[in-house]
Amino acid sequence: MPSPELLNFRTAVDAYRAKLKDECAAVRDAQGLEDLHHRYLSRKRGFVTALFEDLKKFEAGEKPVAGQLLNGLKVEVQEALTALGGRLKASAKTKVEIDPTLPGERRPWGAAHPLRIFQREIESIFQEMGFGIEEGPEIETDYYNFEALNFPPMHPARDAWDTLYINDNLLLRTHTSPVQIRVMEKRKPPIRIIIPGKVYRRETPDPTHAAMFFQIEGLVVDKGVTFAHLKGTLEYFLKRLFGDKVQVRFRPSFFPFTEPSAEVDIECLACGRKDPACRVCGGTGWKEILGSGMVDPQVFKNVTIDPEQYSGWAFGLGIDRVAMFAFGIPDIRFFYENDLRFNRQFHLK
Ligand code: DAH
């Protein structure tokens, strides 16, 4: 049977061992390490040193046992403090390697793509007028892209939209107009929205054609909406975009989903309507910017909005084409080549 003294001694040794572990974990710097060293191993006051004093009390029979316990603790303390010293040195070293006087790592700022800049500009003009923004899917059904917009099946008007079909029923939308239908199906008037998005056509790329490009659609539906609202709003919009003085003209046109329909031109900013040989406007003096019109009553019927009660107008414009004109960009393909030297050149005043 070990004596009560030996049992007590063992408890004390174990307690210091546990305490040491916690204390080591709390040390953050060299000073802390030194304090710890002092408290455990100092010749005069160290816990371990004091325990060595206690050894004297043991009988010859138990002394070696107690001595072994204590030596074990001492070795553990020394090893723990050495390891702690190593850990502190390693973290101090990493700290020194950071030179706070060096300039920070430069992260190149991304810049908005010119098309996006232009899209946002258009969006903000309409948002100021109280329009909301809606989006729709790029893969559409024949119904939304054509039929609900009053293009009957096999109707020749479909030929004007060179369509990329996925199968008999699915296609890549050729315009943002199908989103008009989707919105009117789920929401009753008043509606005042614009719809930006990508559209796709079966085009051979050339300076003015791309197989994918961007449009913005607009739709207003309410009681008592007239062509005067269409005209006033679009004129205001174009003057905000191109400047107060810009001349705007409306030409009669045809779209299956609007009646009457109008195309809207602005004067050629490149030649000021003065150069019969102008490359930008082909000498006509005008540049077509968008298509528009009063929503056809048949379209309202297709979404169960009563055309006797409600009327509306809509428009659609190609963002690429308008941006090319505004920025003087000669080739639509520049937008899609990801050449930063090109992309960085454009911002609105
Ligand atoms: N969706 C037509 C196109 O892609 C543009 C358009 C014309 C949209 C008249 C309209 C509109 O909403 O009223 O050519």
Image (tube, rainbow, N blue to C red):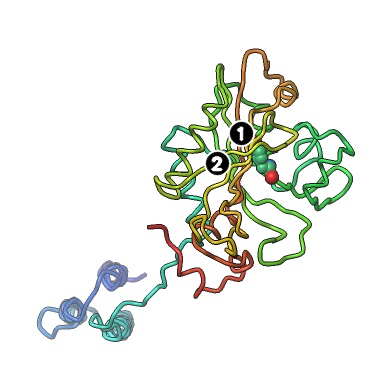
Q: Quick one: SS at disc 1? A: strand
Nearer the observer, 2 or 281: 281
Which is more foreground, mark 1 or mark 2?
Answer: 2
Some atom of ligand 1 lies within 8 Å of the CB belonging to the residue at label 2: no
Left or right: residue 318 versus residue 110 is right
| Distance Cα–Cα, label 1 vs label 2 | 17 Å
Residue 5 image position (x, y, % from top left) = 25, 70
Nearer the observer, 93 or 103: 103
Whereabouts is ligand 1, in terms of quadrant? top right
The residue indicated by pointer 1 is: 314
Left or right: residue 77 versus residue 283 is left
Q: Amino acid at mark 1?
A: Ala
Q: Residue at coordinates 71% horizontally, 24% vertically from top-left?
A: 303
The residue indicated by pointer 2 is: 249
Q: Is residue 277 above or below residue 141?
A: below
Q: Residue at coordinates 65% horizontally, 26% vertically from top-left?
A: 186
Q: Residue at coordinates 67% horizontally, 33% vertically from top-left?
A: 261
Residue 137 image position (x, y, % from top left) = 68, 44
Residue 183 image-quadrant placement: top right
> Looking at the rendering, in which quadrant would you find the N terminus?
bottom left
- The answer to whether any part of residue 272 appears in the image is yes
For marks 1 and 2, the one nearer the N-term is 2
Some atom of ligand 1 lies within 8 Å of the CB belonging to the residue at label 1: yes
Q: Quick one: SS at disc 2? A: strand
> Looking at the rendering, in which quadrant would you find the C terminus?
bottom left
